[in-house]
Amino acid sequence: MMLTGFRWLHLPEPTHFLFISAWRTAMACFDARPRPPSEPRRGVAAALDARLLPAPVNQTRPIIRTTQGGSARSVRPPARYRGLRAACATAAALLATAGPPDTVADAATLPPSGPDCTVVRCVALTFDDGPTQYTPSILHLLEAHHAVATFFLIGPHALQRPALVRREQHDGDAIGDHTVTHPHLTALSSARIRRELDGAANDIASVTGRRPTLLRPPFGAYNPRVSHVAGQTGLAVIMWSLDPRDWKKVTPQAIEQRVINRMRPGDIVSLHDRYARTPKALPLILTDLANRGYAFVTVPQLLASSGGTRPGLVYHHGPRR
Ligand SMILES: [Zn+2]
């Protein structure tokens, strides 16, 4: 854990004080940290690096429903630390050389860098139920359009197609939990919900080396019990604000039109990589939204702009810009 690094605080060795200062600087401007190789900057996201843009005048906060009775509250956006990029780079370099391994691993859990979605129009495309035979074409299209997305995986599917999971990870896409057997979680006991969430999280971690922190409940079915268990399992519940209904027997054109006509900045879009029609709709969606100035981001990138995610809370969309 990160705090174990501070056990050195009681030791007057200059190197350790230097490390602590570097770490504090890095924490102060964590959103400027260098991305690890598994999270490469790409295309539009790189070009729209929010820290190169002016400060937002009016920040929009996302609606975050708590686990208790659906009441709404908002989370303060993180303070902006501009002008610290050089200090961050120095701190990161010091951490790379002086930081103990457990501290470096903890840095990987910090919110990923990406555009500031309180400034830039962002959209988070999400794909549930994979990986499947349709996943490669989706990954190919995302890469061709310099876009990243979020994939919510069924545990056994991840084990059946680990190469696709690793490709998602390598491409900078986010990976979340979509249970083991795809049940209606609201019909299950707390113990069975936990088995579903933990089982898929373990399956995913066995492939990626990292436990997911996001849950997409199958069918979007959640209640206070589900979100409570999700919180205990370290998972934030990620719903959506735009449903193109690709799960219905519709044409690719119907999916395209529903996305294009209804898109608003900050939307989380619910799609699936289990139907042949979904990748057929993607080229026009990706082209049209890019032409309208949208940046395609992962769910963690989208929500990092407004304070990040917390286990057990339910998120429907990001900043409306
Ligand atoms: Zn599903």
Image: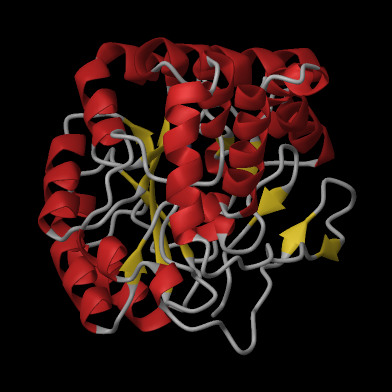
The answer to whether 10 is drawn above or below residue 306 in the figure is: above
Is residue 299 at all visible to an observer of this figure? no
Q: In which quarter of the image is residue 153?
A: top left
The answer to whether 268 is drawn above or below residue 228 in the figure is: below
Q: Quadrant of residue 257?
A: bottom left
* Colouring scheme applied when the structure was drawn: secondary structure
Tell me where residue 5 appears, x and y as whole percent: 68, 21
Viewer-proximal residue among 200 and 82: 82
Viewer-proximal residue among 240 and 169: 169
What residue sits 61% from the left and 89% below the top?
57
The answer to whether 275 appears left or right of 99 in the picture is left
Tell me where residue 86 appears, x and y as whole percent: 44, 57
The answer to whether 251 is drawn above or below residue 16 in the figure is: below
The answer to whether 259 appears left or right of 268 in the picture is left
Quadrant housing the N terminus: top right
What residue sits 58% from the left and 36% below the top?
215
What residue sits 60% from the left and 24% below the top?
15
The answer to whether 277 is drawn above or below residue 63 in the figure is: above
Q: How many labels does the image show?
A: 0
> Most extreme residue toward the bottom, as rendered?
57
Viewer-proximal residue among 265 and 251: 265
Tell me where residue 200 appears, x and y as whole percent: 51, 18
The answer to whether 244 appears left or right of 147 in the picture is right
Quadrant housing the C terminus: bottom right
What residue sits 61% from the left and 15% below the top?
198
Q: Quadrant of residue 203?
A: top left
Viewer-proximal residue among 178 and 307: 307
Is residue 71 at all visible to an observer of this figure? yes
Tell me where residue 320 appears, x and y as whole percent: 56, 77
